[in-house]
Image (cartoon, rainbow, N blue to C red):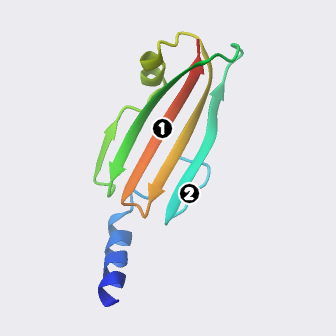
């Protein structure tokens, strides 16, 4: 049991940057939410493009979670709206995903 508390304390100390994922609310232990990012006057379409970035322990962060990358993946030239999803577990692992809708 003592080892468990030690591991939790170490995870807490090492999670400073990894615990934060851009979102309206953030849970230190667990974050899993979706929210809107932007909308345009273009009509809603059926194409959806995604792009994501991940972080491990707040030490290594990789990926391209840009709107441009997501639109390019789906061949979207007219963006309707953009949503995002933020996930984080104990600051050890964090993921940010952008969803671009358009035609």
21 up-or-down from 8: above or below: above
x%, y% of residue 40?
68, 19
What secondary structure is found at the residue carrying circle 1?
strand
Q: Residue furthest front?
A: 46
Residue occupying image coordinates x 37% and y 31%: 64
Q: If the image is split into quadrants, where does the N terminus sit?
A: bottom left
Instruction: Report which residue position mark 1 lands on.
Output: 97
Residue occupying image coordinates x 59% and y 49%: 33
Q: If the image is split into quadrants, where does the C terminus sit?
A: top right
Which comes before the other along the chain, label 1 or label 2? Answer: 2
Disc 2: CA contacts within 10 A as few (<14), some (14-19) or many (>=20): some
Q: Give the number of the disc on residue 17.
A: none
Q: Is residue 20 visible?
A: no
Q: What is the quadrant of residue 63 in the picture?
A: top left
Disc 1: CA contacts within 10 A as few (<14), some (14-19) or many (>=20): many
9 up-or-down from 102: above or below: below
Assess whether mark 2 and mark 1 are in contact (beta carbons under 8 angstroms).
Answer: no
Q: Nearer the viewer, residue 1 or 63?
A: 1
x%, y% of residue 65?
43, 33
Q: Is residue 1 visible?
A: yes
Tell whether 74 sits left or right of 37: left
Q: Give the number of the disc on residue 26.
A: 2
Q: Nearer the viewer, residue 31 or 61?
A: 31
Residue occupying image coordinates x 47% and y 29%: 50
What secondary structure is found at the residue carrying circle 2?
loop
x%, y% of residue 60?
27, 49
Q: Residue furthest bottom?
A: 2
12 up-or-down from 80: above or below: below
Residue occupying image coordinates x 40% and y 61%: 91
Measured Cα–Cα span from mark 1 to mark 2: 15 Å
Q: Nearer the viewer, mark 1 or mark 2?
A: 1
């Amino acid at each position: 049991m003592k080892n468990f508390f030690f591991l939790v304390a170490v995870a807490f100390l090492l999670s400073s940057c990894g615990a934060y994922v851009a979102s309206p609310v953030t849970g230190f232990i667990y974050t899993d939410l979706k929210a809107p990012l932007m909308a345009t006057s273009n009509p809603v379409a059926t194409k959806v493009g995604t792009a994501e970035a991940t972080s491990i322990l707040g030490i290594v962060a990789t990926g391209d979670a840009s709107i441009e990358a997501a639109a390019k993946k789906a061949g979207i030239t007219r963006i309707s709206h953009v949503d995002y999803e933020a996930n984080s577990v104990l600051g050890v692992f964090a993921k940010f995903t952008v969803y671009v809708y358009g035609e």
